[in-house]
Image (tube, rainbow, N blue to C red):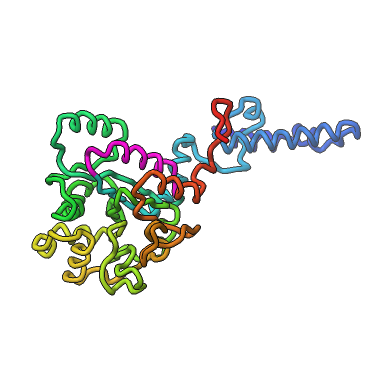
Amino acid sequence: MSESFHFQKMMMNPNFQKVMMKPAKPERRPFIIFSFFFILFLCAIASINGVRIDTILKFGSCNFFSHNSSSSDDFLALNFASDPADDDIRILIGILTLPDHYHRRNFLRMIYGTQSPAGAKVDVKFVFCNLTKEDQKVLVALEIMRYDDTIILNCTENMNNGKTYTYFSSLPEMLNSTEGPSPPYHYVMKADDDTYLRLDNLVESMRPLPREDLYYGYVIPCPSMDPFVHYMSGMGYLVSWDIVEWIRVSEIPKKHMEGPEDKVFGDWIREGRRGRNRHTAKWAMYNYPEPPTRCTHELWPNTIAVHLLKNQEKWIQTLKYFNVTQNLKPSKLYHIP
């Protein structure tokens, strides 16, 4: 018989009823009240955690809270089966660079490794063509073993002769999987290694935008604010995953690869009648303010990208302006004025 039955039987016992109905002495009432609420508390704990307390079982089963006999792991699995992160924006940023640029890659790893945009999965990868030197085969392999942030394309190193096409067209075969999310990324960006991207601002600018047929960046010519006027600057442009899939299968890019890569990419979009949804992030994206041109802008808080950081001084001035070391934790191990 169940413990609940025993408890009910005990409650029906006349002797037990007499004891319970017998007036308590005034000096014992506080103790009885305290004991009663203490037992309620223990019953609640036992019910929530699925723990049987032997001393409570002597008085019957505690049914104040319903519960099942599943483990705490089952409880967690039930409550987190629908992961909110499934709705997070997924962005792949491919920084096109050269195999020998070890110092630049390590510098950029610090820049992007210290940024953690909320509500988004942003992966930064370094992209270059086939390795051609013995030292590259050793040093790049060590980088991959340590950081796993490199894409090596099956091409001969170049800037304006098909490298961008190989990058975008190779991604579906590399990344599509039955086990991961579909699509693997909502957006794919191509960026230069002299561009500083502020990932939080990039993600926030993407949230209201469509996830299909999107072409995003800094529109050229520089004075224009019309995203349909021409093409997006090579400093950093982004497309939705469906356009990446289209590049892989379309004959249009295959027939037109030579020329300034950002302009050629814009030609593909126009000829293929893609990018019905376009967004120019001007003037949150711009060239470094010195020397001043029609494409430059002063550094300002709403920045998404700063381009043409061709030397260490420009990088340092930019990073200082955005106070990138503000989250440095104090420690007895170092002193930085």
Q: Residue 190 in the image: state x and y as whole percent.
A: 27, 54
* Residue 308 or residue 330, whichever sits in front: 308
* Residue 320 or residue 276, whichever sits in front: 320
Q: Measured along the vertical axis of the image, is residue 144 above or below residue 281?
A: above
Residue 82 is at least partly visible in this image: no
Image quarter (top left, top right, bottom left or bottom right) of the N terminus: top right
Magenta: main secondary structure: helix
Q: Residue 123 in the image: state x and y as whole percent.
A: 34, 46
Residue 216 is at least partly visible in this image: yes
**Is residue 158 found left or right of 275 in the rendered image?**
left
Q: Measured along the vertical axis of the image, is residue 109 above or below residue 94?
A: above
**Is residue 36 found left or right of 48 in the rendered image?**
right
Q: Which residues are magenta?
A: 98-117
**Is residue 205 found left or right of 13 in the rendered image?**
left
Q: Could you tell me which residue is drawn at 27 percent across and 58 percent down?
A: 234
Q: Could you tell me which residue is drawn at 31 percent across and 31 percent down?
A: 146
* Residue 290 or residue 4, whichever sits in front: 290
Quarter occupied by residue 239? bottom left
Image quarter (top left, top right, bottom left or bottom right) of the C terminus: top right
Quarter occupied by residue 31? top right
Residue 79 on the magenta segment: no
Q: Could you tell me which residue is drawn at 29 percent across and 62 percent down?
A: 233
Quarter occupied by residue 45? top right
**Is residue 30 found left or right of 127 in the rendered image?**
right
